[in-house]
Image (cartoon, rainbow, N blue to C red):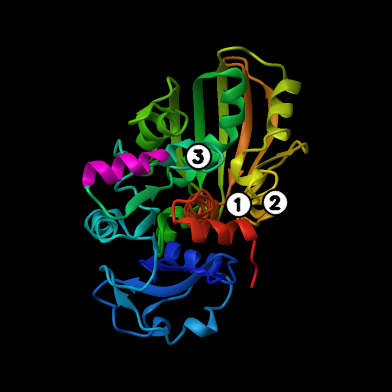
């Protein structure tokens, strides 16, 4: 068996999410970053010249002189991680998939296509089977998988173990979303300092009508039967750098006790954790007993893989619904680049990159 890592590239490498992909891929045991791609405006330039690096750590030294490629098929890699804006992702991701690349996308362009997996590996790994439907229907050599919106990711991650055991009928959620979710340079300081902005374009529609229902739905052999869950969402931008906080009230089909809910979270052991994927946090959901936690500044990096877990707290009865609680998650790590990276790890481990790649994952090689 070859011990070579799988070659990967990043589309949109100069942006905030592209930088987060690059950060998370450093020293990865299965993936080797071989291609950085950007818009025509910066393609051909060294990465250090084209990129305003804003991630806390320094730009990786070995990438500073890497020449940026254009976002078109041709790079020598098997997987491309897409951090492209939606307006350009549609055509570019399709071109890469048609050319035989595996596209793990953070963009919204294909999330709601009936033949494209919208994945949270802990929640719906069986939806990967849509890849076969997609390839047949579109006659692509490669394929596209997507991860959900950052606020949906942590909401559904916390709901999934409860929905599986007790069934969920209704969800009321109010989000307090960090400014990094708006990209760089993001929200104007004149708009966000000393303020809360009670509107994020398109965000409530994603949470109410599209993503939770698809993620919690069931694969029927040719598509997804959406979950019958009613969601009401209020989405707000707050002056926090990283970490989305969400307050949630839920009504169950079969009302559990508080002890039942806590046990469902604490006993949750989904597939990525069973497979010991490199970026699968253990546990997937962390419950905090302190009455004033979780908090973004204190808890956004909680867990065995910093930034990849969903943190929950303040479980208590709800006078209108059944129970209410608070959710926190890192929006640019698990809610963006880290979500796509974990998708790729699951695809590799489950054989979607071929037997040799799956053997690499199974051997747990760390170089």
Q: Label 3 vs label 2: CA separation?
A: 22 Å
Question: Quick one: 218 or 242, which is closer to the camera?
Answer: 218
Q: Are marks 3 and 2 in contact (CB under 8 Å)?
A: no
Instruction: Report the mark closest to the observer, 3 or 2.
Output: 3
Task: Examine the image and state in which quarter residue 65 appears.
Answer: bottom left
The disc at residue 125 is 3
Question: Quick one: 76 or 324, which is closer to the camera?
Answer: 76
- Mark 3 is surrounded, within 10 Å at the Cα level, by few (under 14), some (14 to 19) or many (20 or more) other residues, namely many
Q: Looking at the image, is 315 positioned above or below residue 63? A: above
Which mark sits nearer the N-terminus, 3 or 1?
A: 3
Q: Label 3 vs label 1: CA separation?
A: 17 Å
The x, y position of residue 90, in whole percent, is 24, 53
For the point 44% across and 56% down, the residue is 353
For the point 30% across and 60% down, the residue is 100
- SS for callout 2: loop
Which portion, as a residue range, is magenta? 129-138
């Amino acid at each position: 068996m070859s011990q070579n890592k799988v070659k990967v590239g990043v589309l949109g490498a100069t942006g905030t999410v592209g930088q987060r992909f690059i950060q998370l891929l450093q020293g990865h045991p299965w993936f080797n970053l071989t291609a950085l791609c950007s818009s025509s405006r910066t393609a051909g330039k060294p990465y250090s010249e084209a990129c305003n690096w804003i991630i806390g750590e320094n730009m990786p030294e070995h990438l500073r002189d890497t020449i940026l490629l254009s976002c078109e098929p041709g790079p020598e890699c098997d997987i491309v991680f897409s951090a492209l804006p939606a307006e350009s992702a549609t055509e570019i991701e399709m071109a890469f998939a048609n050319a035989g690349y595996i596209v793990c996308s953070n963009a919204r362009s294909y999330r709601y296509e009936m033949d494209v997996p919208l994945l949270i590996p802990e929640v719906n790994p069986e939806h990967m089977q849509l890849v076969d439907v997609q390839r047949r229907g579109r006659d692509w050599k490669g394929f596209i998988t997507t991860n959900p919106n950052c606020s949906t990711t942590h909401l559904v991650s916390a709901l999934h173990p409860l929905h599986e055991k007790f069934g969920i009928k209704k969800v009321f959620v109010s989000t307090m979303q960090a400014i990094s979710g708006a990209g760089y340079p993001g929200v104007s300081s004149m708009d966000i300092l000393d303020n809360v902005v009670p509107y994020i374009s398109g965000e409530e529609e994603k949470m109410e009508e599209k993503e939770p229902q698809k993620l919690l739905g069931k694969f029927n052999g040719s598509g997804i039967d959406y979950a019958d869950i009613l969601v009401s969402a209020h989405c707000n931008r707050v002056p926090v750098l990283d970490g989305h906080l969400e307050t949630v009230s839920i009504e169950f089909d079969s009302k559990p006790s508080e002890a039942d809910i806590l046990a469902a979270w604490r006993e949750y052991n989904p597939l990525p954790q069973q497979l010991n994927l490199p970026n699968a946090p253990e546990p997937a959901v962390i419950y905090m007993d302190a009455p004033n936690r979780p908090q973004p500044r204190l808890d956004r990096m909680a867990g065995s893989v910093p930034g990849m877990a969903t943190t929950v707290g303040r479980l208590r009865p709800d006078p209108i619904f059944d129970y209410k609680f608070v959710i926190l998650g890192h929006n640019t790590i698990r809610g963006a680049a880290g979500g796509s990276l974990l998708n790729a790890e699951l695809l590799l481990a489950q054989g979607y990159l071929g037997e040799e790649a799956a053997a690499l994952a199974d051997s747990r090689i760390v170089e």
